[in-house]
Amino acid sequence: MSDKQRILVVDDEPQITRVLRRSLTSHGYDVRVASDGVAALQTFGDWPPDLVITDLSMPNIDGLQLCRNLRAISQIPIIVLSVKGEETTKVQALDAGADDYVTKPFGMDELLARIRVALRRAQAEKSDGEVSSVLNVGDFRLDLENRSVVVKGMEVHLTPKEYDLMVYLVSHPGKVLTHRTLLAAVWGGESVEQTEYLRVFIGQLRKKIEPNPATPQYIVTDPWIGYRFLPG
């Protein structure tokens, strides 16, 4: 049995699937393709992949519904390919369960980097076993039992809500987190429209953890969509 990591590519544009199959195969991945969500779900059942790359606009089951269907049965990483400028649709895809998105037209180097990040994160989550009381990610060390945060060896004092937000960010390194996702996770489902909460608390966190809050390197903004935590 092959020990190559498996990637399922879902897109109804044959030229896209040909390019992706050729490039991903040349980088050591085992690749299969599907032309729509129905075929993707069938392939998923017969040949469980390690990661799914899907377009959004497809016949039968589209990319949004595919994300929802996959997320109902699996925590597999999902990367969405989205037409540039469709910010609302990107948000919908991320809220539907996608882990990341890459805009079309895309650079293969960027896509490969996003794939590596998603696969590393999935592997780390799989190998964790029991949930550790300490999170060590990049420049950050969070002691969940003592509710302490250390950045590059220096302890940072956070309010309870700042701490809750920090834990969620650190637990999802490299992943695009929409405003609604963060608000629901930290403030609850009834607060998903209160984006001003998020702006205030992200601003406060940046003042406490960023070397230069004006040009953040840890909590970066994905315009109109949300935030991405880069641990350094």
Image (cartoon, helix red, strand yellow):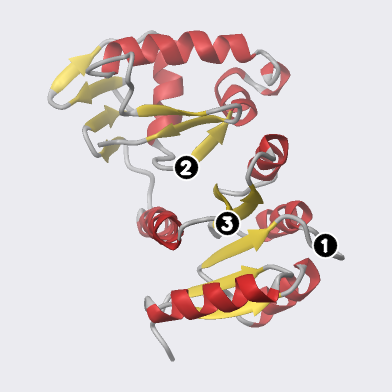
At which x and y percent is residue 188? Answer: 64, 21
From where the camera sits, is residue 161 visible? no
At which x and y percent is residue 176? Answer: 51, 39
Q: Where residue 90 is drawn, which disc sits there?
A: none
Whichever of labels 2 and 1 marks the residue nearer the N terminus, that label is 1
Regarding mark 1 in the picture, which secondary structure is present there?
Answer: loop
At which x and y percent is residue 33? Answer: 64, 77
Regarding mark 2 in the picture, which secondary structure is present there?
Answer: loop
Image position of 210 (left or right of 19): left
Q: Which residue is mark 2?
A: 175
Q: Residues within 10 Å of mark 3 (few under 14, many from 20)?
A: many
Image position of 184 (left or right of 138): right
Q: Nearer the viewer, residue 13 or 168?
A: 13
Whichever of labels 3 and 2 marks the residue nearer the N terminus, that label is 3
Image position of 15 (left or right of 3): right
Question: What residue is at 79 percent from the left and 58 percent from the top?
Answer: 62
Q: Nearer the viewer, residue 27 or 108?
A: 108
Q: Which residue is mark 3?
A: 78
Regarding mark 3 in the picture, which secondary structure is present there?
Answer: strand
Whichever of labels 1 and 3 marks the residue nearer the N terminus, that label is 1
Seen as rendered, the residue at the extreme left is: 153
Q: Which residue is mark 1?
A: 61
Picture layout, residue 89 above or below residue 109: above
